[in-house]
Image (cartoon, rainbow, N blue to C red):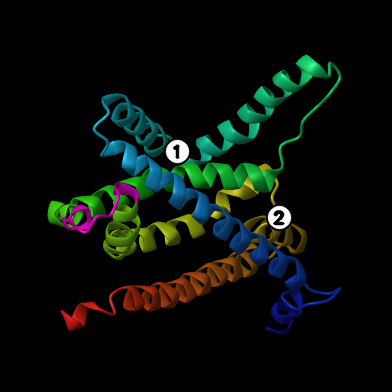
Amino acid sequence: MTDALTLLSFGSEGWGDEIARGTLITVSLALASLPFGLVIGFVVALGKKSEEPSLRTAANIYTTIFRGLPELLTLFMVYYGVQILLNKIYQVFVPDGFVDVNAFVAGMVALSVVFSAYASEAFLSAFRGIKQGQYEGGYALGLRRGQTLRLIIFPQLIRLALPALGNLWLILLKETALISVIGLDDILRWSGIAARVTKEPFLFFGAACLIYLLLAMISSIGLTWIRTWAQRGEGLR
């Protein structure tokens, strides 16, 4: 027990500092991916419910691709494929130039597009839960389409989509573990390094499990508070 505590401690004798940094990277990556995923997902949902056939087709192709591909394969395509594409373009102007894609940015892009593909379905379901009379009421008050969407539809949309989006956030938090394969120093990567160096895989991977569970518990508490806040007016109706 003493040896385990020493290995997990902070300082020169333990791996606590590295695992703490890995936890910070994991949380930062998830938080950085979330807003992009939400915005893209909302735009894709608008495309899916658009009256323009080309927009609906493009939105459906987008979600089919990124819901159908394994997340790890999407990550590889972004990290290696985008790097090759950028270098091809860059070398047109600078023949000996080289562009190195940051692992954090590549992970953020990959997680964002996958999250957005699923989030678009959550938003689309929420749109379907809002009656047409809500739009007509906004227009009757003299509101333009954008104002109706922002002031009347969007608050209801968030409330209806929150349960599904909450589940997607927890999935996103877990999927950050995939980023360790491209060299980002997250929880899983530092746990793997510590396990190999100390020959204590159960200890460090067990600690990583506890950290992920703790993050999920904190997220669940936060999501419950947000859901309660979003539904605060329901009891008055």
Count neighbours of disc 2 (C-alpha within 10 A) and say few if under 14, some if 14 to 19, many if 20 or more: many
Q: Which residue is mark 1?
A: 70
Label 2 sits on a secondary structure element that is loop
Which residue occupies 63% across, 41% down? 106
Say which residue appears at 48% left-offset and 42% top-offset.
Answer: 113
The mark found on residue 36 in the picture is: none
> What whole-number distance in Å separates the C-alpha atoms at marks 2 and 1?
22 Å
- In the rendered view, tell whether residue 84 sits above or below residue 201: above
Q: Which residue is mark 2?
A: 185
Identified by mark 1, the residue type is Pro
Q: Position of residue 174 (x, y in %)?
A: 49, 58
* Residue 80 highlighted magenta (yes or no): no
Residue 222 x, y percent position in the rendering: 44, 75
Stretch in magenta = 137-146
Q: Is residue 178 left or right of residue 151?
A: right
Q: How many marks?
A: 2
Q: Is residue 15 left or right of residue 44?
A: right
Image position, residue 36 (x, y; %): 51, 49
Residue kind at label 2, given as amino acid type? Asp
Residue at 86% across / 73% down in the picture?
Answer: 12
Query: Which secondary structure dominates the residues rendered in magenta?
Result: helix
> Is 124 situated above or below 199?
above
Image quarter where the N terminus lies is bottom right
